[in-house]
Image (cartoon, helix red, strand yellow):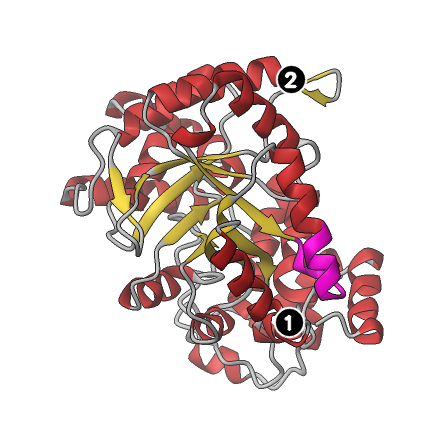
Amino acid sequence: MQYRQDKTGTKLSILGYGCLRFPKTGGRIDVNAVTEQIGEAVRLGVNYFDTAYVYGGSEAALGEALRRLGYRDKVYLADKLPQYLIKSRAGMERCFQEQLSRLGTDHIDFYLMHMLTDLAAWQKLCGLGIREWIEEKKAAGAIGRIGFSFHGDTAAFLELLNAYDWDFCQIQYNYLDEHTQAGRKGLEAAAARGIPVIIMEPLRGGRLITGLSDTAQKQVAASGRTAAGWGLRWLWDQPGVTVVLSGMNSLEMVRDNAAQADTACPGCMTAEEHAFVAALRADLQASLRVGCTGCGYCQPCPAGVDIPGVFASYNRLAGEGKNAKTQYLLTTGLRRKGTGASQCVGCGKCEQHCPQHLPIRSLLKEAAKELEGPLYKAARLGVKILKLW
């Protein structure tokens, strides 16, 4: 296992354990299987475990597994405050205490503001006293480091980076999403500030494995590395990446991912390997609805539409269905100033700058029709009425 340091010099395993997708039996998390897999992961060098308040049963299962193994002091726990549910400082405290209880611990090493989408979401928390609360928890040793997980566009991410003295941050990033959400620009901006970056969705929820054509799958099989291994290696090649989270839910997955981490370091990929990943990306993009590369030349949109983000969700729709719509809601809808496709006013400025010469306006209409159903519209109305952000 390779390790990279955070701002304090703490060594974190480059492979982190994402605890959203724990194995289940009969609809419930199988704690015995979780314990076995976590035990194997720690044996192979993994020391960073990521969960969240809203990952049904995950906190309790993780806490129980670590108790059985006696491994609490061998690992770093990352958990998240569901800021979208918080209405007061007392609410922060109740949630945090519940998390400590579920995890069976008296402190959380890495604590994140969950799913910040823009600066307004953070400012709302500041109005509730989050800064003072964080300082109190840090002083008491109940929280080690503070960060945020992000779903939004690059501009919003850059604003959030400058809004607080963050210890770390977490973004969705992979070779297919290189220029959407925070993107490479956001990753490099965080690294320039010395802020460690934790990567989520490194394999696009498995899309970088299952979405490959038969021809590409044969090429991967002949390469001596798994499709997952290629996706992870592409990330670890970049010095700004600190930890890559993998939603492992089998011993086979734990062992394969750990094996990929054995020789991964910044700059480890050769020119031939980069070309191979580029070919895999092209193979995946060939099946997409919109040939958007996420370059961002169409931005900023005068009406506020996150065009690359909209098209990324639209492209995910065929293969991921409900998950794609959820991602779209998170990235464009759950913010005070929405960035969805329906906000397009048809000015055409974007099309003048698109290197791919895409008919962006008509494509946005198609995307809005399929992505902005009753749930999305209700959520947008709720944000406006309740002023959640």
Is 340 on the left-hand or right-hand side of 112? Answer: right
How far from the left and from the top, in percent, is residue 206? 50, 34
Task: Note whether 186 is above or below 46 in the view shown.
Answer: below
How far from the left and from the top, in percent, is residue 324? 64, 48
| Quarter residue 113 falls in | bottom right
Q: Is residue 327 magenta?
A: no
How far from the left and from the top, in percent, is residue 50? 51, 40
| Quarter residue 362 falls in | bottom right
Q: Is residue 365 visible?
A: yes
- The quarter of the picture where the N terminus appears is top left
Residue located at (60% from left, 79% from top)? 304
Q: Nearer the viewer, residue 227 or 16?
A: 16
How far from the left and from the top, in percent, is residue 2? 24, 34
Pair 2/1: label in front = 1
**How many other residues sit within 10 Å of disc 2, few (<14), some (14-19) or many (≥20)?**
some
Kind of residue at disc 2: Asp
Q: Which residues are magenta?
A: 82-94
Residue located at (55% from left, 64% from top)? 152
Q: Please tell me whether mark 2 sits on a helix, a strand or a loop.
A: loop
Mark identifier at residue 129: 1
- The quarter of the picture where the C terminus appears is bottom right
Residue located at (55% from left, 62% from top)? 136
Is 274 on the left-hand or right-hand side of 343? Answer: left
Q: CA distance from mark 2 to mark 1?
A: 38 Å
Q: Please tell me whether mark 1 sits on a helix, a strand or a loop.
A: loop
Q: Nearer the viewer, residue 286 or 319?
A: 319
Mark identifier at residue 7: none
Q: Is residue 93 magenta?
A: yes
Q: Nearer the viewer, residue 146 or 138?
A: 138
Prevailing secondary structure class for the magenta stretch in the rendered image: helix
Mark identifier at residue 30: 2
